[in-house]
Image (cartoon, rainbow, N blue to C red):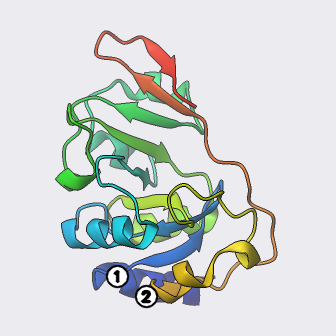
Amino acid sequence: MQTEINKALATLKAGGIILYPTDTIWGLGCDATNTEAVAKIYLIKKRVDSNALISLVADKNQLQEHTTVSIQQAENCLPTTIIYQQVCGLTSNLLGGNKSAAIRIVQDDFCKQLIQIFGKAIVSTSANISGNQAPKQFSEISDEIKKNVDYIVNLRQNELRSTPSTILMINEDGSIKKIR
């Protein structure tokens, strides 16, 4: 696993795109602070950039770098993706109109180690062309997606990974709304 972390890390540091297994699905990822890399993901997916993407962080400390929401409130929702209001520290093309962003504290060991070593949030979006069904396993990822990434992580390619995360939104008043 360390070899794959090192290769993915080098790709992220160079502003590249990785295709990798997350705790929920196979995802396309990049440095969540790199505007050009995020724009490349939108192009690969053929997705309009007004549809925000999810970012992954390794732990509560990294989450606190991006939001002022009570960490206890966020912990009550793990391992769910949460849309936070007034996020900072991520590239603007990841944010919604009100500076909101979807962030998940990752549970997967590979992702957690990669993000901890990288020291920044990374993007996680399903490895499919926008509008198409998300692949249930690596073999279902289109060649078009595979040829447009800079590195494909060579881990868990035979596993079934078909459940996208639940998405909740924490409103400014503290109330929680289920999105997906």
Expressed as whole percent of the image width and height from the top left, the position of residue 153 reads: 58, 82
Which residue matches tag 2?
150
Left or right: 171 as drawn, with respect to 112: left
Q: Looking at the image, which is closer to me, 40 or 80?
A: 40
Expressed as whole percent of the image width and height from the top left, the position of residue 94 reads: 28, 51
Q: Looking at the image, which is closer to me, 178 or 82?
A: 178
Quarter of image, res 95: top left
Secondary element at tag 1: loop
Residue drawn at point x = 63 percent, y = 78 percent: 142
Q: Looking at the image, which is closer to me, 41 or 133?
A: 133
Mark 1 is on which residue type? Answer: Gly
Q: Is residue 112 above or below residue 94?
A: below
Expressed as whole percent of the image width and height from the top left, the position of residue 97 reads: 21, 35
Quarter of image, res 109: bottom right
Residue drawn at point x = 42 percent, y = 11 percent: 175
Expressed as whole percent of the image width and height from the top left, the position of residue 32 reads: 30, 61
Which residue matches tag 1?
16
Q: Is residue 34 above or below residue 68?
A: below
Of marks 2 and 1, which one's residue comes earlier in the chain? 1
Q: Looking at the image, which is closer to me, 112 or 17?
A: 17
Secondary element at tag 2: loop
Left or right: 79 as drawn, with respect to 150: right
Is the N terminus in the top left, top right, bottom left or bottom right quadrant? Answer: bottom right
Residue drawn at point x = 61 percent, y = 43 percent: 165
Q: Is residue 150 above or below residue 31?
A: below
How crowded pointer 2 is (Cα within 10 Å; few <14, some 14-19, many 20+) is rated as some
Mark 2 is on which residue type? Answer: Asp
Number of marks: 2
Residue drawn at point x = 41 percent, y = 81 percent: 9
Between the residue at mark 2 and the residue at mark 1, the CA separation in whole angstroms equals: 6 Å
**Cβ atoms under marks 2 and 1 closer than 8 Å:** yes
Is the C terminus in the top left, top right, bottom left or bottom right quadrant? Answer: top right
